[in-house]
Amino acid sequence: MDAISVIRAKRDAQELTPEQIDWVVDAYTRGEVAHEQMSALAMAIYLNGMSRVEVARWTAAMIASGERMDFAALGVPTADKHSTGGVGDKITLPLAPLVAACGAAVPQLSGRGLGHTGGTLDKLEAIPGWRASLSNERMMGVLRDVGSVICAAGDGLAPADKRLYALRDVTGTVESIPLIASSIMSKKIAEGTGSLVLDVKVGSGAFMKSLDQARELASTMVELGTDHGLRTVALLTDMSTPLGNTAGNALEVREAVEVLAGGGPADVVELTLALAREMLDAAGLPDADPAKALADGSAMDHWRRMITAQGGDPDAALPVAREQHVVHAAADGLLAALDAYAVGLAAWRLGAGRARQGEAVQAGAGVELHAKPGERVTKGQPLLTLHTDTPEKLPYALEALDGGVLITPPETEYRTTPIVLERVG
Ligand code: URA
């Protein structure tokens, strides 16, 4: 077997054989297939797709590239959530301690930013002292003591995905249904959670731009999970505009803490509660009341213990970027659209995401929203604040926002899009 014949087969839109898939995933994990060869194969998969049979085999090969974990010893039901990636998507931060406060254990293995979307680990690393990397023993310890843990997957878990995920981020091969489905499900199945709720984002700020694509991704993942005995459901949720009022690492942590304190933006609270109810249902705890756990402070208590257990100081001041730049409304009217992709790209260009593998992100960089679609605005009022440590990038970030802000005459009718669009599973 050799990499060139596998690349050629997929380049020519052929179905890869199980042997080709097993070999190429294993050889890439061992370093025998070079990054440039896997880049070419990923691009061929991006362009020509994969059948459900190929995706299932590719996922199984990624699972087999490493170890599998098992939480049976905890003696409580486990539930996890995974988002396909969005702008301002800080939901994991309040959700994990909230579900733990309701009685399920949440082993939340999370990732870093991918393309214009933020990553949970990059966000939490804005908290002074907080560590993403834990040994398996330490992860189990935090889970046992606190009930939830958010950390990087250990080196042993789906190492094929670790290499491929970082490669896709810098080769324009993220937005592919087979690659996203296999990436997410290999980690979740290897992780050993008892149930899984997928948040499949739809819209300009998501990798899936249309409802049809999102349905296809959701059903592929639900099928993969079910075939491996993992209770899996998916919510399709709106990502045409950023979630909440912030996109960027420390900015989003601040907003997540507001939600845990019983406040925060209505859309973030609504989606956090919707996902919490699905997780608790899937974990066999349908009578738990997540709204009560937010209101009575028990979710906040779990958050503080979880952050502390991972070396973080929940009371420490969060980093603030060196420079701020305010974007004002250009006219009186109705804010008809604030495009999620434009905001995500601007946040990324301000330094919240990375352009090269392994690059550091700026904790304070990002975009703050002062108005949301559907609100009336007046000419000159602040609409956005851009935060960055590298002000020379501001023109580049402002360019990303070109055409992303739409103000229509004040009398224009506005139709609200629901956050949760559909459920699959
Ligand atoms: N999240 C993942 O883990 N992988 C992807 O490919 C996209 C989102």
Image: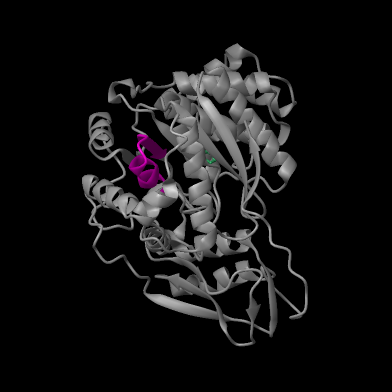
Task: Locate residue 413, reporting x and y percent.
Answer: 77, 71
Q: Quadrant of residue 107?
A: top left
In the depicted view, which residue is nearer to us: 249 or 38?
A: 249
Asked if 219 appears above or below 292 in the picture, the reply is: above
- Asked if residue 3 shows in the view, the reply is no
Which residue range is magenta in the image? 95-109
Task: Locate residue 115, reporting x and y percent.
Answer: 54, 50
Kindly identify the residue that appears in the image at 54 percent across and 47 percent down.
85
Q: Quadrant of residue 46?
A: top right
Asked if 397 appears above or below 259 in the picture, the reply is: below
Is 106 inside the magenta-drawn segment? Answer: yes
Query: Looking at this rendering, what residue extends furthest in the front direction?
Result: 287
Asked if 140 appears above or below 96 in the picture, the reply is: above
Is 413 inside the magenta-drawn segment? Answer: no
Task: Locate residue 314, reporting x and y percent.
Answer: 25, 57
- Asked if residue 306 shows in the view, the reply is yes
Asked if 47 appears above or below 385 in the picture, the reply is: above
In the depicted view, which residue is nearer to us: 283 or 167?
A: 283
Kindly identify the residue that appears in the image at 45 percent across and 29 percent down.
284
Kindly identify the residue that appears in the image at 72 percent across and 31 percent down.
48
In the depicted view, which residue is nearer to us: 67 or 284?
A: 284
Q: Quadrant of residue 208?
A: top right
